[in-house]
Amino acid sequence: MTTTLEHTAHESKSKAGGFLRHLNFFTGVITGVVMAVIFYVIGRVTLDQSGRGFVDQLTTVTGVGWVIGFWLGIGALTGVGKWFIGKDQTHADEMYLAGKDMGKFRYWKYTTDHKVVGVQYVIVTMILLGAGGILAMAIRTELMTPGNHFVNPQIYNAFISVHGMLMIIALIVAVAGPWANFVVPIMVGARDMAFPRLNALSLWTLVAAIPLLLGSLCIGGLSMGWVTQAPISEQAGPGMDLFALAIITFAVSTTVAGVNTICTVLTMRTKGMTLERLPIFVWASMIAAGLGLYAFPFFLVVMSLNLVDRMNGTSFFIAAGGGTGWLQENLFWLMGHPEVYVILLPAVGALFEITTVFSRKPLFSYRTAVGGMAALAGLSVLVWAHHMFTTGWAPTLGGPFMLTTELISIPTGIVFLCILGTLWRGNIWMRLPMYWVFGFVFNFIVGGVTGIYLSDIPVDNQMHGTMFVVAHFHYVFVGSVLFGAIGALAFWFPKMSGRYLDEKLGKISFWLTFIGVQVTFLAMFVSGLRGMPRRYSSYSIIFEHTNFISTVGAYIIMAGMLVLLGAIITSWRSGEASGPNPWHSKTLEWLVPTPVPLENFEVLPVITEDPYTYGEELVNS
Amino acid sequence: MAHNNDTKQAVRSIFWIWLVLTIVGVVIGIYAPGWLMPKAASSTMHLVILTVIVFSVAAAPVAAMVYSIALYALVKWRWRGEGVPPDGPNLRNNTPLTAVWVIGSTVLTIFLLIWGLAALAVDDGGGGGKNPMTIDVTGQQWAWSFSYPGTHVSSNELYVPVNDKITFDVTSKDVVHGFWIVQMGVKVNANPGVTTTVSVTPDKVGTYDIRCTEICGLYHAFMVTRVKVLSDADFSKWLASQPSRA
């Protein structure tokens, strides 16, 4: 079979790609489902049905079958398989794999071109945000009134668990996925990522994780919240197995993507692109990717240990068996806090780029900006136990963790310094991307200042586990990171589509989202201050008004997001044509044609200065 | 020269915006926490509210600075012409400014840290009183139970005497729960298999709330109960009236 296919591949260039010609997203799904069924049947026959962990084993085996089947069916293992039997891909195969002359259908395939992967990441991010957003609306609808009216507590608990994890995953990929893939290789003057096939692998592995996560919601029993604290996560129903497996799959995806980004920046830069001339977004992407390589293995480990506890009767996290839930909490937050900066840094990098271009000024204090982002990354691995001040674990370490946590406000201040310094005396061009920069500046101050209260142990003893914490991190994730992600979308949309993102709809969306965030989360701060714990499906009548306001605010955010979705769809189809460099930017991605050719550059550029030379003619003249 | 005048004008205007915003922030910082947070029923909670006020007042000028510069830029440096604006000045760095910014934020951080550590040291659960006592707290899905060592009394609502230091030995029978007395500013997790400890001295007679703060399954939201702070005489009376469950 293989020899025949190889033969035809060599015979004619138009038959390049071999077996991969028959594979796409749909064959991936079909093979995934078939493999899941096969694994399920094998599990049913071979596993000990009387064992305690039987249901968990069967669920996990089925989930693993889905992932392997999806990989096989989409062609993720074809290249490796061919290499293994001593027949590597030909150049024609590689070009086919990159989507050469394939038209729109390449977006449904295991395509290695980094620009295709970037577009695919935009779609996947929107699906994740959409699913998480629907759950958010369901949660807020339930919380609109004090009792349990809309969903029962069991479904509520499942909703908050999956809402949390969907949104975390969505925001981890929201900037790094689309833009570290689409623009970073062009920004450094490369023809593609360092490992194009790994690039496709990271995207499709993420796609494979989504049905697992949504499936966990369907088979139910999620009672543990997204932090999967033990032993409630040991007690949870079989949904927890798919939940853990989804995260293990996702951890593989981000690791592959992170290695790829770092290698691309370190090894694929064109001549003259020194580290000092890198656009700031490249630095942000690389630092975030490096931090992800540190953080996500903990994610994988904590979920794996949880799974074997559930399946195989170990007791890593079960006190009765000699384990401890504190181990789970430590491992989880060793991931959980760096992850915040894996999420935040690419957004900050994108906002820096936007600020320089639309202020027509160099980035203020480039080296401080790079140092500040590196300091954020460095400190973020030393603060995890501030999530554990009230757990009773190691009270003597409270002081040191308070110290490291509060030190983070210094590099956070640098982020503001660089943005404000760039705005200073600029000619500020208030196009759509710039709206989101100002929105970020406003919201990130609120998110940052409220974080300081929480870093203080006596105050945290009061606030921990309340709606105050929820409002705080939503100001950071929605008000800051999502604003950065939408700003980045508005900024690079013309490069991706050749059209402007509709300014009018975009600005309506901005104002709805901005006002919605203030209404929702300011009211939520008050709920928390007055003593409402988080993850409550029902609450005392004294929290009635603030919760009602938060729900109204959440609907306003939803309206803003729907308008944005409308803007994206209409602009993609029939927006105003933008030309290759509508913002008159100086970074490389704007200097190549739109649409960007398959290998980006006909001749690789030679770099002689950094891309922030705004106003140099004024100095020289 | 024109640039210098621009800068001077900008700095002056920003200063006034900053001053107004700072005053607004400080006023909110002083009054909002006491107004929004529950009325304190222990010295620990007084300290929490005071800390929130101090941090708000300290944060006000910083937030006001960022907002005033951003606001000024948005209004005064906004390009109102057609098409792409011309380049702005080639300002790549200003080392003294960067240094001042970083040192300033460091000083503020050190202040917050010292305050935090001092508050942590002071906050040992309060005075002590005449009869410090220990109460065993057990969480289970989805209720709290309180037992009074040496008395064989146990209850699903907490009764404590006023002005005596109470030490809670907290544990759980099943999953992790969060033991939180809302108006007293104390919280510690109830973990299965271990005992965690927290102390507080209630300083006001009254009825307050206990709420679970770690998700513990189906009826997490209903794992709430009350604490009644009684005068010494009332507390002794209550204790004596309880059936012994030994």
Image: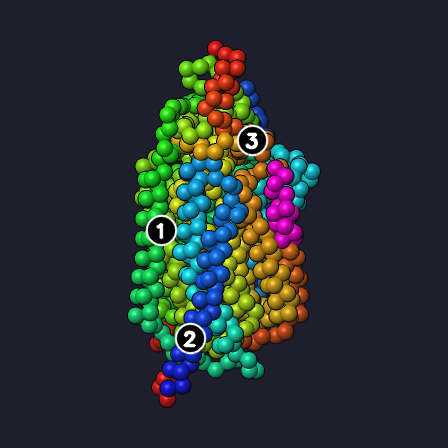
Tell which subunit mark 3 falls on.
B
Look at mark 3 in the image and give the residue it sits on. B224
- Residue at left offset 48%, top offset 64%: B21
Element marked by disc 3: strand
The one of A252 and A158 positioned closer to us in this rendering: A158
Label 1 residue SS = helix
Quadrant of the image occupied by residue A212: top right
Looking at this view, name the residue that lies furthest to the right. Answer: A149
Q: Amino acid at mark 2?
A: Arg
Labels 2, 1: one chain = yes
Residues rendered magenta in the picture: A540-555
Viewer-side label of 2, 3: 2
Work out whether residue B177 or residue A373 is closer to the camera in this orientation and state it: B177
- CA gap between label 2 and label 3 equals 54 Å
Quick one: label 1 or label 3, which is nearer the N terminus? 1
- Residue type at mark 1 is Leu
Label 2, on which residue?
Answer: B12
